[in-house]
């Protein structure tokens, strides 16, 4: 299916000249559009077909946005140019897509047309490694444009002759646009307005944490949601302070954000219902929780993290499940979430909290001992039962010297 047909009679050879812009277009941006427009003018092409890849062979290392979304964005981006059209022939093809199959297909469809396959220097650099590159050159002419001020490639690099078209250098990439979205930065003037609106409306490229927090904001009360964001930030700050690696930081971010995801639910639903769900989900609630039902929100949080938020990482689940009372031999992740929950800056300020915060950034085990002792003593003085795991957590740390 092609979105527009552009018929043109060149008057001399009666042969249409068709440019093909292949790419992942995840998303399509003004760099792509300007390349197509300038090459079309320079070579007198009648039309340029944008061909979003289905399952691109060169992008197997990351999750590519759905073909439908990428196709829709190409349509929006090219709608106002009568010389541009979008083809869905690659996205309809099953399996990994190769350019050579596309060129052969187009050649069959337009036997009398001259085909021009347009690539940037970054793509041209590896052209000699593309499957069927010789066949591509036999069936179309290659057009190379500079990217980021690159030099014209050697003829050998692309295994034959090619057109070199000088174009305005626009340092724009889809990678940069996706990153801007994750960082919450504007993408205005990098993509056409219609594409920007589509990205925002469909919630594309927001990143896992942003998507989780959108869901969480619906689930939790405003103060509880704000507290969750603060715990997430504090956990990240502690993680960075202790030079945690990227994978641990990501886990801290998610566990911090979701640690209380079941808190409101546990306050609202009858305990029996919570108990039933936890029992069925592999988190049987200890009998002790009947005396202090709110302790169940950690276990229920781990259940919701998996079922509702799709987080099925045992380390994250464990940090969520024990964040209120601790346990013996806690991991770094578990300790950081426990402490971040206590010291995050929107908690009411007190001398004890200030000391806990100071200790947390000096010695994480000493901070754990301090906070566990504080909470155990506070509960004892109020005549409340102490959940044995808290005492065990404290005993373990003291036995292991808290260093
Ligand atoms: P990503 O960052 O995800 O790799 P991209 O911006 O490189 O995305 P692609 O869809 O990979 O976009 O590129 C399709 C084609 O467009 C490639 O041939 C590429 O070289 C070319 N191209 C993309 N952006 C530019 C640009 N700013 N200037 C020149 N050519 C470009
Ligand atoms: Mg690219």
Image (cartoon, grey):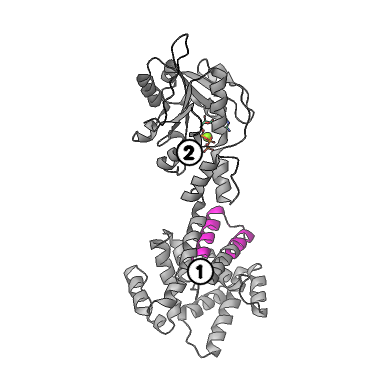
Image x and y of residue 352, in percent: 65, 79
Tell whether position 150 is magenta.
no
Q: Is residue 311 left or right of residue 167?
A: left
Outermost residue, top side = 12
Q: Is residue 265 left or right of residue 189?
A: left
Question: Can I make out residue 335 in this image?
Answer: no
Q: Is residue 181 left or right of residue 140?
A: right
Q: Looking at the image, which residue is at 44% across and 13% down?
A: 15
Q: Nearer the viewer, residue 347 or 170?
A: 170
* Rendered view: 33 above or below 176: above
- Mark linked to residue 76: 2
Q: Name the N-terminal-most of marks 1 and 2.
A: 2
- Residue range highlighted in magenta: 234-258
Tag 1–tag 2 contact (CB < 8 Å):
no
* Distance from Cα at disc 1 to Cα at disc 2: 52 Å
Tell me which corner region of the image, top left, top right, bottom left or bottom right, holds residue 136.
top left
Q: Secondary structure at mark 1?
A: loop
Q: Nearer the viewer, residue 189 or 70?
A: 189
Name the residue tied to disc 1: 330
Image x and y of residue 184, in percent: 58, 52
Instruction: Give the main secondary structure of the magenta stretch.
Output: helix
Q: Nearer the viewer, residue 3 or 205?
A: 3
Image x and y of residue 248, in percent: 53, 57
Q: Looking at the image, which residue is at 64% across and 28% down?
A: 149
Q: Secondary structure at mark 2?
A: helix
């Amino acid at each position: 299916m092609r979105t527009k047909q552009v018929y043109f009679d060149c008057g001399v050879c009666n042969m249409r000249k068709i440019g093909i812009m292949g790419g992942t277009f995840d998303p399509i941006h003004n760099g792509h559009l300007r390349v197509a427009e300038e090459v079309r003018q320079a070579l007198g092409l009648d039309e340029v077909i944008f061909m979003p890849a289905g399952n691109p062979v060169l992008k197997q290392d990351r999750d590519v946005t759905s073909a439908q979304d990428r196709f829709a964005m190409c349509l929006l981006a090219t709608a106002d140019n009568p010389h541009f059209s979008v083809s869905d022939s690659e996205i309809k093809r099953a399996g990994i897509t190769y350019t050579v199959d596309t060129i052969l297909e187009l050649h069959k469809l337009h036997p009398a047309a001259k085909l021009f396959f347009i690539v940037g220097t970054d793509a041209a650099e590896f052209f000699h490694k593309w499957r069927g590159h010789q066949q591509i050159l036999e069936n179309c002419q290659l057009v190379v444009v500079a990217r980021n001020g690159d030099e014209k490639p050697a003829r050998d690099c692309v295994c034959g002759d090619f057109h070199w078209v000088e174009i305005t250098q626009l340092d724009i990439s889809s990678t940069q646009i996706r990153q801007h979205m994750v960082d919450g930065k504007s993408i205005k003037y990098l993509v056409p307005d219609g594409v920007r609106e589509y990205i925002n409306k469909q919630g594309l490229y927001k990143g896992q944490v942003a998507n989780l927090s959108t869901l969480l904001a619906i689930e939790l009360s405003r103060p509880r949601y704000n507290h969750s964001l603060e715990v997430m930030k504090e956990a990240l700050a502690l993680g960075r302070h202790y030079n945690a690696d990227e994978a641990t930081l990501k886990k801290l971010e998610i566990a911090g954000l979701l640690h209380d995801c079941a808190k409101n639910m546990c306050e609202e639903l009858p305990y029996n219902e919570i108990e039933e769900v936890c029992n069925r989900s592999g988190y049987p609630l200890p009998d002790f929780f009947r005396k202090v039902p709110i302790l169940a929100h950690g276990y229920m949080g781990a259940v919701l993290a998996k079922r509702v938020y799709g987080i099925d990482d045992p380390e994250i689940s464990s940090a969520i499940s024990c964040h209120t009372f601790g346990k013996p031999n806690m991991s770094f992740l578990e300790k950081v979430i426990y402490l971040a929950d206590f010291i995050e800056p929107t908690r009411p300020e007190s001398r004890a909290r200030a000391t806990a915060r100071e200790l947390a950034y000096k010695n994480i085990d000493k901070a754990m001992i301090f906070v566990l002792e504080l909470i155990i003593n506070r509960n004892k003085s109020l005549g409340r039962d102490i959940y044995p795991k808290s005492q065990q957590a404290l005993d373990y740390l003291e036995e292991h010297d808290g260093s």
